[in-house]
Amino acid sequence: MKLFNNKLTQVITSLFLFGTPAAVLAQTTEESAPMAKPKAVFPSMNLVDVKYEHFFPYEYGMKRDGNRIEMGENKQQRVKAGLLIPFYMKNKWIVNGQIRYKYEKYDFENVEHYRDSLSLMHDDREEYHFFVGAIRATYQPTLWGKPALFTASVFADGSNKELIERVNVDALGKITLYKDETTTFDLGLVATTSPTAIFYGIPFFMLEHKLNEKWTLDLVFPQSGYLRRSIGSNGRLSGGVSYVSELSFIYPDQSTYAHSAYTYSRNEIREELLYEHSLAPGLVFNVRGGGVTEFWNKMKKKNTSDKFVTTWAPPVHGFVGIGVSYMPQIKKK
């Protein structure tokens, strides 16, 4: 008997996020931003990106109806890959498609079960696959003399067991209230129909402030905050905090949980250092590491907000990762 039979996570994220408004915010402000000339040598959006992450061993636990059902240790690895497909770029309109894939592997050790009748049995190793496909339209008008951006997306996500499990919609609007040579300030609102979202709508602001020739403050509240420093002509070092939302599809095969798909929502606060190096125009290699704090991790019946299983982990466990991305210069017609 297995607990999780193969599947995994979110997004359209895509950037995506994955299922929560903060995820939608990340995906829209980065991946779905206007497709224009790459920003400096480090584009905030990418035509292709691949990343690998390794999480150091940590303890975990599961509860159902407030009762502890399982505890153990876990080792985790994660691979993500994404492709952005531009369809139409003319005047103030941009339409693109996105494809995202995510693979995660969990190795369980020293597992202890507390209530056998409710135990979520699983193999010592579990693998999850997650797919997202999206169509996104972006419109960039001028409001009250200020640059603005509106974007709407329709996305489907699924797993290797069911290619399409859900279809949802997200939307974002923002306006640039202030911009000069050193500072840009945007204000906006993001919303999603995803039933796994913590909030269905949330306001945000974006601040990019150049402190001097080498240092820049980059805030996307409530999604991330980084202090960035240029290293030579091709490098950049960043330190800060970010919110990452992950989603997996789970298919328990015990009779207690049968005949339905479930979603496992995992939310992470990351404190990390990130180094990026431009290998060629638009081609960037990065390496990162730091600590992860998990919270609000829930297992729910698909397309419902009902709590099914709560999982928890230590306040902080470490991770390291590497990645490569490519964004050529693409001009609008």
Image: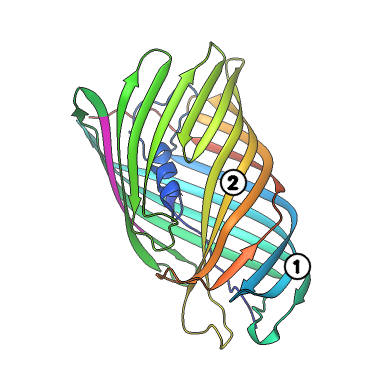
Q: Secondary structure at mark 2?
A: strand
Tell me the distance, in whole angstroms, between the alpha carbons under discs 1 and 2: 22 Å
- Residue 256: x percent and y percent? 56, 86
Viewer-proximal residue among 265 and 235: 265
Residue 86 at least partly seen: yes
Residue hosting label 1: 72
Q: Residues within 10 Å of mark 2 (few under 14, many from 20)?
A: some
Residue 278 at least partly seen: no
Viewer-proximal residue among 168 and 205: 205
Q: Residues within 10 Å of mark 1 (few under 14, many from 20)?
A: some
The amino acid type of the residue labelled 1 equals: Gly
User: What label does residue 215 carry, if any?
Assistant: none
Q: Which quadrant, please, contains the C terminus?
A: top left
Viewer-proximal residue among 202 and 166: 202
The part of the chain drawn in magenta is: 148-155
* Quarter assignment of residue 104: bottom right
Viewer-proximal residue among 168 and 218: 218
**Residue 274 relative to residue 131: left or right:** right
**Residue 317 relative to residue 3: left or right:** right
Residue hosting label 2: 269
Say whether disc 1 or disc 2 marks the residue closer to the N-terminus. 1
- Residue 268: x percent and y percent? 58, 50
- Residue 293: x percent and y percent? 64, 49
The structure residue drawn at horizontal position 50% and vertical position 27%, both measured from the top left corner, is: 218
Q: Which quadrant, please, contains the N terminus?
A: bottom right
The magenta stretch spans residue 316: no
Is residue 331 placed above or below 120 in the rendered structure?
A: above
